[in-house]
Amino acid sequence: MLDYWHRQGWVTASCTEQVGATRSIRRYDDAAVLRLGAMRHLAQSRLDVARFGPEVGLVDLTGPVVMIIGSQPDATVEVVPSEELRQSVARPGRWVVFDPQSLKTRLGEGTAERVDDESSGIESSARPRWSA
């Protein structure tokens, strides 16, 4: 799935390394990992990721926000401040809610494999952490 989402341009690697004639490693920054988590959540919620993937690929989940998608036929991806979640989902209908906080916590704790590039000048938020 990751390869498909990458080819579609919904999530892109922050850097790609060639490690052989036919093999490359893509590394993703924190923002991309959060978008990947959101797409995984949509798939687990049985929503059509192909429908919402292009929108999810553009959202910024780095702040204190949650992502919501309604069940209406014309539903769109919405990113709202966490404190406005209750008000946002009080509207009639069913909702899929992705709260990226637990993933942010895991990223902050360094549970992902970190790349040692302190000398590269890459800001911490853009530093590649995950590889595929």
Image (cartoon, helix red, strand yellow):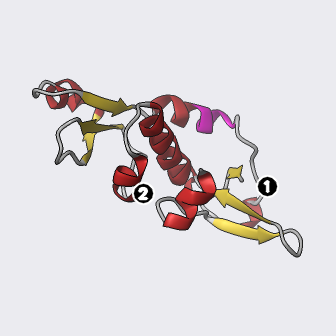
Figure disc tally:
2
Q: Name the residue under label 2.
A: 57
Is residue 3 located in the magenta-colored stretch of the structure? Answer: no
For residue 116, the mark is 1
**Magenta stretch in the rendered image:** 106-110
Q: Which of marks 2 and 1 is in front?
A: 2
Q: Residue 127: horizontal and vertical position, in percent?
A: 64, 57
Q: Is residue 99 above or below residue 49?
A: above
Residue found 71% across the figure and 53% down from its top:
132
Mark 1 packing: few (<14 Cα in 10 Å), some, or many (20+)?
A: few
Q: Residue 87: horizontal and vertical position, in percent?
A: 14, 27
Residue found 46% across the figure and 38% down from its top:
43
Q: Give, as a three-letter code, the residue at label 1.
A: Asp
Depth check: 73 or 127 in front?
Answer: 73
- Specify the principal SS of the magenta part: helix
Query: Position of 49 compared to 36: left or right?
Result: left
**Which SS class for mark 2?**
loop
**Which SS class for mark 1?**
loop
Mark 2 packing: few (<14 Cα in 10 Å), some, or many (20+)?
A: many
